[in-house]
Amino acid sequence: MTEQIFDFGDELKITATFTDEDGDAADPATVTFKTKDPAGTVASYVFGTAVEVIRIATGVYKLLFTPSAEGVWYWRAEGTAPVKQAGGGQFRIADSGFY
């Protein structure tokens, strides 16, 4: 798998898609995105509370997020019943001579 590398200051658009047992798009009761910075600090963004999380369509949610530090970051998206699913990934913010 190729590592995703972004420049410091880029706004990332992280998308999560949730489906029911038939594979059809479906909305969880709650959608939470989490990010973990290179220092290990975890931040949570809940749809309906955090302006950074938007609903694109049924079962499709997006986190608009600008990382605040260089290094390896992790993200996770979690949905609660009736569509209890989770997924995640990682990315790197490239070193910059300016920050």
Image (tube, rainbow, N blue to C red):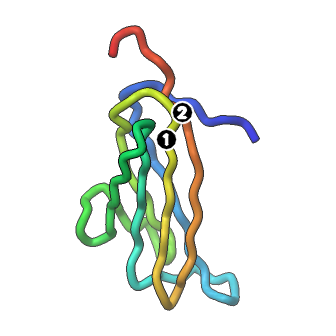
Q: Secondary structure at mark 2?
A: strand
| Residue 88 located left or right of residue 2 | left
Q: Report crowding for label 1: few under 14, some 14 to 19, many 20 or more residues within 10 A (C-alpha).
A: many
Q: Residue furthest front?
A: 40
Q: Report crowding for label 2: few under 14, some 14 to 19, many 20 or more residues within 10 A (C-alpha).
A: some
Q: Are marks 1 and 2 in contact (CB under 8 Å)?
A: yes
Q: Position of residue 39 (x, y in %)?
A: 40, 37
| Amino acid type at mark 2 | Arg
User: Which residue position holds label 1?
Assistant: 73
Q: Position of residue 24 (x, y in %)?
A: 63, 83
Q: Which mark is residue 92?
A: 2
Q: Position of residue 44 (x, y in %)?
A: 34, 60
Q: Quadrant of the N terminus?
A: top right
**Distance in Å between CA atoms under marks 1 and 2:** 6 Å
| Amino acid type at mark 1 | Trp
Which residue is painted at 38% across and 79% down in the image?
30
Q: Quadrant of the C terminus?
A: top left
Marked residue nearer the N-terminal end (1 or 2)? 1
